[in-house]
Image (tube, coloured by chain):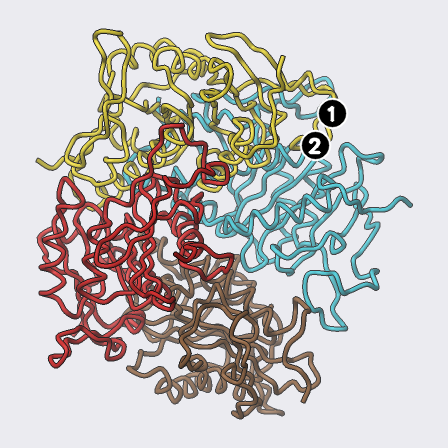
Chain colours: A yellow, B cyan, C red, D brown
Amino acid sequence: MASFFSDHKNHPANVICELCRLFYDNNWVTGTGGGISIRDVDGENPDIVYIAPSGIQKERLHPKEMFVAELPDKILRSPNEDNEKEPLSLDLAANFKYKPLACTPLFLSIYNLRDAGACIHTHSQNAVLATMIWEDKLVFEMNNQEQIKALPKLEMNVATGKIEKVGSLHNHETMVIPIVDNTPLEEDLTETLEATLKKYPGATAVLVRRHGIHVWGENIWKAKIYNEAIDYLLELAIKMHQNGIPLIKD
Amino acid sequence: MASFFSDHKNHPANVICELCRLFYDNNWVTGTGGGISIRDVDGENPDIVYIAPSGIQKERLHPKEMFVAELPDKILRSPNEDNEKEPLSLDLAANFKYKPLACTPLFLSIYNLRDAGACIHTHSQNAVLATMIWEDKLVFEMNNQEQIKALPKLEMNVATGKIEKVGSLHNHETMVIPIVDNTPLEEDLTETLEATLKKYPGATAVLVRRHGIHVWGENIWKAKIYNEAIDYLLELAIKMHQNGIPLIKD
Amino acid sequence: MASFFSDHKNHPANVICELCRLFYDNNWVTGTGGGISIRDVDGENPDIVYIAPSGIQKERLHPKEMFVAELPDKILRSPNEDNEKEPLSLDLAANFKYKPLACTPLFLSIYNLRDAGACIHTHSQNAVLATMIWEDKLVFEMNNQEQIKALPKLEMNVATGKIEKVGSLHNHETMVIPIVDNTPLEEDLTETLEATLKKYPGATAVLVRRHGIHVWGENIWKAKIYNEAIDYLLELAIKMHQNGIPLIKD
Amino acid sequence: MASFFSDHKNHPANVICELCRLFYDNNWVTGTGGGISIRDVDGENPDIVYIAPSGIQKERLHPKEMFVAELPDKILRSPNEDNEKEPLSLDLAANFKYKPLACTPLFLSIYNLRDAGACIHTHSQNAVLATMIWEDKLVFEMNNQEQIKALPKLEMNVATGKIEKVGSLHNHETMVIPIVDNTPLEEDLTETLEATLKKYPGATAVLVRRHGIHVWGENIWKAKIYNEAIDYLLELAIKMHQNGIPLIKD
């Protein structure tokens, strides 16, 4: 079994740590909420997936704290196996047991149904507030914004049955993000999420009401761009709402 | 007497400095307001408590500027004993005398009544503004938010008479944070705080009107998570109020 | 052909990277939106222009990812020529092709019509929101603010036919920034931009509705100051609007 | 003549650079607005004053770019004397001439009338917006906030005719900051400022309408605390106003 770690700054385990620090500064993963998973799409085995642990200070994550799984759902490596506690992110009680992110089943669904290369989950206040301002809506919609161009145009390829990226959205097109209701347990969202992924083939994100957002992409850098662009648009939408400006312009 | 200092990044005196810099960037301890105290729960003597000094630039704190006490209330070490002024956080006048945080009696009450491992006090504007928006309330209440899951479920163990953590709150449960009125002198809050700690066994924080918030936890990393999650929820609550969204959803 | 790179921190390719990181932190270039171009005004050939690539994480840019052009519009160097992918900003797929910023034609127009030394384009939410709050206006106008003094006073020199900086605006003078409508393709803005540059000789910036802002100056440091001052004023204007304070005071 | 520079991080020229970077991140000195001056109160000659230059990127300042004066008003050293341009903050045109901050006469008045140890001037939007929200007021007043305790209680000593710090304000006391109208030239504010300093002996700051704020203290660390605490209170006051909460509570 090859090593799951590397000194290279672009290795998935290292990128998760770098981006968790960035997301922490953006107020997206405070209180250990949210997380990141990366599929090793350029590696020897593109079914290998790295997943951040649950309940750990996101800005202090260490690469050796990652879980490693193989798609569809086999855990290959747990940080609990590591005897070397010292370099990790904090002083852990002797009986501490790492757990993967509670949203791991959702990440695995997204990998399997969408052939994604990375999944991002945040508790961004822009996402949470938007789902409450537009509480009676099942989708968040917005058009005529330049930033929409950062998002992918996704279409079902009827020949392969797979959803493929066929370009980028135009600025005058409408970005559509479905909104699903929250559940008491994060894993109970899986069924709803899977139905939503099928119902909205054009979506690269799902909002979870009073909870946050899931965003995915063909690799981590694209997923990061989509997440940033959507959060920018959600923030702008809330300001537009407060200034009486409609989100849709014909 | 063992040394109260160490090069290890997770030593209490070093963690106080690291977190004070972080809290400064969050606008929680500007103008030297607020502070942190850590109990050495994993050390040889778990009754040893580190306390930041009063009136010093929080983002420039040096570990040797800490006071060290032994519970219930004995000061073991003062930074005034240190002859080596050079490495400290700023040029101090020759007659400068360090004082421990004015809220030290409150921290000691929390350690003694709640068996806490760390206490955080901030002047967060979210906390202060919330106590004024809901000026006629004696408790701040909010439910149906995913971020509530980051908070502990605390219950009185009738056998031991101690308050114990029995899990985490569910997202649909109601977070309750008591609000007490401010007093001219910070130490005069002690009696009110102690009565509140007894009246609200489920609380892991107390808001002080027109002043800030006190948050505690079983260790500094948990206290940090609780403080971040509560501040996130207070910020969200203010935005909800401004958008006409009630904090409680049945 | 001389090298287009240098270790000097003030070399154009390095300054673009430094400022893109700064602009990223300001939320001006999230989701890879916006960009910077610098003309080597102090170099051997002042017609050499450095242009950031399109669609790359702005906070992770590497100097070798820059395009280099010679005015009026000849591309001298593309990062695709570089065989050394390793030190660049991210793991690039083998078939990845760099493209210069989509707004490159706009930058070249500004260099040619205004003899500028640097061009900045951001997706600042202050800019975008202002164009929607004042949706029926063709210019954004504001006066009686000290920060206006940071902006240049520009006048047409009838002898040379060139626009020249004759000093700074006074705080009681009115800053005028034209607003143009967005187009589906960024290059289609060129004609509108050129007409606007001619119609408003006193402008050092143009707002693009529901898109962002273009700012230029005699060198990158001046362009940076103008961009910061304008963004500050747009942010202030939005707050004034929300508090019912008019932007123009007689 | 002794050197005006040192490697010590707490040397006035170095502290100005450190704090200008911090203030830049706080959005207080964007677009090169605002600045800092420090009097060498602990040095051999406490009448030596360091003053930042005008129009330079505040976050990139170099200690050798400082002007040095001797009170009451003699310039001892100009950065233009320095032949070594390389290590400075940016590529300067060969004919560039440094100028001290335009508010230097105001700083000198404060040093002479108040025996201050440091002066801070910012273009904080909280300060500017407050002077417009309360446009008909000649003073900004606020009470019953814990953060008020960070501010000094100043009184005229009738024996010496000097204003002295006699302690700190209580949280229930009223902080009073006079507001003066802006003038086209910054130096024309001097007369108004001097009259205001005499009329309000208890003030440690003056707001300039549609411009910013001047704050001073017995040394730079105290001036920094006062400036942070006042900005915090101005920010809070604006939020209170937006939520219909009066600034004065009896």
Mark 2 residue element: loop
Mark 1 residue element: loop
Q: Amino acid at mark 1?
A: Glu
In the displayed image of the protein, which residue is found farthest to the front? C1
CA distance separating discs 2 and 1: 7 Å
Q: Work out whether residue C104 or residue C74 is closer to the camera in this orientation and state it.
A: C74
Give the side of residue C181 with respect to residue A239, left or right.
Answer: left
Please report the residue visible at 55 percent of the width from the left and 27 percent of the height from the top: A13
Q: Chain of mark 2?
A: A
Which quadrant would residue A138 be assigned to in this image? Answer: top left
Which quadrant would residue B140 be assigned to in this image? Answer: top left
Give the side of residue A111 with respect to residue B193, left or right.
Answer: left
Instruction: Tell me the quarter of the image containing the C terminus of chain C.
Output: bottom left
Q: Amino acid at mark 2?
A: Pro
> Which label was assigned to residue A87?
2
* Image location (x, y in percent) of residue B37: 68, 45
